[in-house]
Amino acid sequence: KGSDDGGAEGGGEMNAVLDLRGKSKEEQKEMISQLVDMAAKDAAGSVAEEDAVNDSSSNDEESLQKRCINTLRNLEQHGMISQKQKRILLTDIIQATSEGRVSIIETAFNLLCNGEECELNDDGETETGIADFTEQCRVFASEEYD
C-alpha cells in the first residue's frame, strides 16, 4: 500500500509503505520490483519535464539575445549608435553569456522594446521603446568604456 505526503505533484517526495507480512519471498520480490519500476518511471518523467522547461527557457534567452544583437547591428547601420558603442555592447553580451548571466543591455532590450527586433523607418523615425533603448545603449557603452 502506498501513502503520499501530499507533495508528489509539486515535485515533493512520495513516501510508500509496503506491508510484506505474510507474503512469500516471490510475492515480496514482485511487490518491491513494481514499486521500484513506478519510482523509476516517476523520476524519468520529472527529469523529462524539467529538461523541457530548461530547453524552452534557454531557447527564449538565446532568441532574445539574437534579436538584441540584430537590433544593435541595425542601430549602428542607421548611425544611431557608433561602431565603437556597438562593439562595447556586443563584448558585454558575450562576456555575460560566458559567465552564465543575461547582460544589462539584453535586459534593457527586453524591457524597453518588449524583446522585439527593431525595424527602423527609412526616414529615421523610431518608436518610443527603440528610442529609449538607443539612449540606454549610449549610456551603457559610455559606462563600460570608462
Image (cartoon, grey):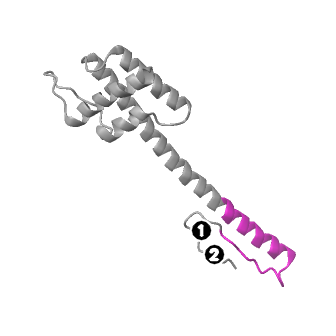
Relative placement, left or right, of 39 versus 125 is right
Q: Residue 132 — which label?
A: none
Quarter location, residue 35: bottom right
Identity of the residue drawn at 71% across and 68% down: 34
Relative placement, left or right, of 39 versus 70 is right
Identity of the residue drawn at 42% across and 34% down: 104
CB-based contact (under 8 Å), mark 2 and mark 1: yes
Q: Residue 4 — which label?
A: 2
Identity of the residue drawn at 81% across and 70% down: 29
Q: Which sits in the foreground, 117 or 33?
A: 117
Q: Which sits in the foreground, 138 or 107?
A: 138
Judge whether 120 appears above or below 61 on screen.
Answer: above
Question: Amino acid under label 1?
Answer: Ala
Judge whether 33 appears above or below 122 on screen.
Answer: below
Identity of the residue drawn at 58% across and 63% down: 11
Which residue matches tag 1? Answer: 8
Residue 65 % position (x, y)? 41, 32
Residue 21 % position (x, y)? 83, 83
Q: Which residues are magenta?
A: 14-40
